[in-house]
Image (cartoon, rainbow, N blue to C red):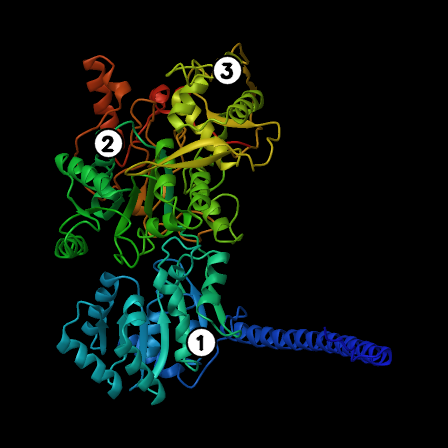
Amino acid sequence: MSNLVDLTSDDDIDDNSKEKELIRRELLQLKDEIYVRQCRIADLEQLLKEYVQAENRKTQEKNQLQFTRTDGVISTYPWSKILEETRIHKFHILYWRPMQKEICDCVLSGIDCMVFLPAGSGKSLCFQLPALLYPNRLTLVISPLIALMHDQVNQLQALDIRAARLGSDTSKESSSYIYESIGQGSLSLLYVSPELLIKSKTLQRHLSTACGQGKLARIVIDEAHCCSQWGHDFRPDYRKLSMLRRLYPDICITALTATADDKTANDIRTILCLLPNTVIFRQSCDRPNIFYQVQMKPKNASELGSQIASLVSEDPRFIQGSGIIYALSKKDCESICSNLIDLGISCACYHAGLDSNIRESVYSQWQSNAIQIVVATIAFGMGVSKADVRFVIHQSISKSLSGYYQESGRAGRDRQPAVSVIYYSPQDALRIAAMGVEGHNNELQLIEMLGFCLDLRTCRHVLLERHFGESSLPDSCGKYCDNCLRDPNTLTRVELTDSVQKLLAELRSSKQCMTIKQLSDAWRGIGSEELKFPPHVLLDKKTFSTMDCQKILLHLAVSGLLSFHYVALRYAVQAYLKYNECGLPLRPPYIITFVKNSKSANAQPSTANSIGGTQQVVQPAASSSDVTGDAIVPDEAPVKEMSNGINSPRHGLIASEDDKCLVNLMASDSDSCAPIFSLSTPKHRTPVSAKQHRPASARRRSKATAASSSRRSSAGSLSGNKRPISSDHSSESTLATANSSDFESS
């Protein structure tokens, strides 16, 4: 057996250990030095970043001050004279609207800008006019809707302006001509969709060539809120427009929209990679010429159709102008349109399920006043430009408050008085929640929309202003919404803390999920025995109707005490309500406001509920401005002057004496939900006779009395010399039943 020899001596091992220890120490020393240097680098980078941010802020403030001056000084530029001449002689526009000139100056200065102006403010002129000042340079306009692009191109071509639209339906010959025009610089404005711009390498190549030759002037992104998932019309391809800054880094970008809250605005700026010195132009979102009205939806579609028909056929303001009725689905759209046609109303359907030629025909007929009303889904929305739209009616709540603002903003673009009526029901809330379950942030947007409908005392104009992060309006709009038009003495406040606490405790312990109807029935102790709550939890069904209960449940959802729960069925998604495990605890007192009725005026609701606990009646303060969306206008309703504006100090507009109209909310009861807004015929117009649609309560009277009452009501509502509701009939017109009351949690 061979002997093993140890080649390492003890001295060698000691030497190796010393060398390793030295290496370790040197490594630690170097790491410490690296750490110190990294900290120093991070400090310097942060300091440099702060310096750059401060410099950018100064530049932005300077630009902002330059283009949004409030001291009355008018800035002049080398292009100011030709800008004025082009506006007058080419577009035939004699006067600037607010901010239009400043935006044009900013665009011509080559600075990025974001423009937030309400509908009807003339946003299109802000990029169309600058496009004409520099010949042989192209302005690229990105727009989401073919109909909108088609209309604008036709209008520009009618003014002998070189404009074109490039789309998937454009012929090869036309496409070749457009590409050739881009290279030659003979086109002033080119409209494209974001989808085409993202997918078409040919278009990108021609634009890059034009950019390299100095023939691409600017890029305009219309309806820019589509970039953001916080926006109500999110389009995925809009998010890919971030490539524009990478492909064309030296070209200024202008983003325009009418509907963008702070979150959406920040999203737009980030996605489009707008430069730090971007100038922001923002007008108040308020539309002071629009009367906002929230109304409970009738029990069935035919009754809703009759109510809308009565409104449209009897009110002279509605008769003389065009209108839009928005429906939630294609089926609802066709049903409402069919009902209105049967009642003699001139209308047509418009939704995505129709052939494009039919949609185009309907739109053309509506634009030319061949038909009065378009009954549409939200496919008929952005870019609809018609000056004489006098009313917009929503058959159901919108999916978001931003969407509702834009849709209702189709009315009154000529700045003349207009009306927005929105019908809502608790069932619609869960239906919309189920439709938007896969969308980003849809539930939060729906909660905001429900809060708008359920709020019974805050001015509707103020609610919309708050949604967009503004706070310039007074607390009251001058009685130009249903809330500000109410007499606060018609309200009663009821404390439901005990009943709500018992309901929440039961739902928390049972972990049940129910539809809003199942939950309201279980709370009232009716319906399925399996779902009924224990006796100590129940509400008094004699005091609270099903609708009352469902409204309270919506308030609980809006306040975060209940949450939505979704279950995927075979062909659809069902939305349920359940106890919100992540919600904040209930803070007593929980007070609900509802409308007095003729009985409650003399006898208040019972303060003791033997089954559901205690409901304490809390009378409103004398100075309270609480108002309701379903109540009736008091007998002494104020006269609104509605010719050239709104007779209100905050609007600064006074109507002509010959065009006075009387605003009145018609009587509403639990059975009929009668018309909610009426304008009497001005003295210089001939009254229009129309079929009277009487509420169910009137139909239950004797025939002779009903006929007499109907004739008096017709004479009152259609005569310029008589009030629609006289003081002799206050019992019929001033108080809603307790079973149809509106609520608001305090």
Whether residue 141 is situated above or below residue 446 in the rendered picture: below
| Residue 289 in sight from this viewpoint | no
Question: Which residue matches tag 3?
Answer: 604
Q: Residue at x 55, y 27 (%)?
A: 591
User: Earlier along the polypeptide chain: callout 3 or callout 2?
Assistant: 2
Where residue 130 appears, as percent x and y from the top left, is 35, 78
Q: Residue at x 61, y 27 (%)?
A: 589
Where residue 383 appears, as percent x and y from the top left, is 29, 59
Question: Which residue matches tag 1?
Answer: 106
| Residue 680 in sight from this viewpoint | yes
**341 or 561: nearer the viewer:** 561
Measured Cα–Cα span from mark 3 to mark 1: 62 Å
For the N terminus, which image quadrant? bottom right
What element does badge 1 sit on? helix
Where residue 295 appears, as percent x and y from the top left, is 36, 34
Where residue 654 appears, as percent x and y from the top left, is 39, 51
**Within the image, what quadrant is residue 544 found in?**
top left
77 displayed left or right of 199: right
What element does badge 2 sit on? helix
Measured Cα–Cα span from mark 2 to mark 1: 51 Å
User: Earlier along the polypeptide chain: callout 3 or callout 1?
Assistant: 1
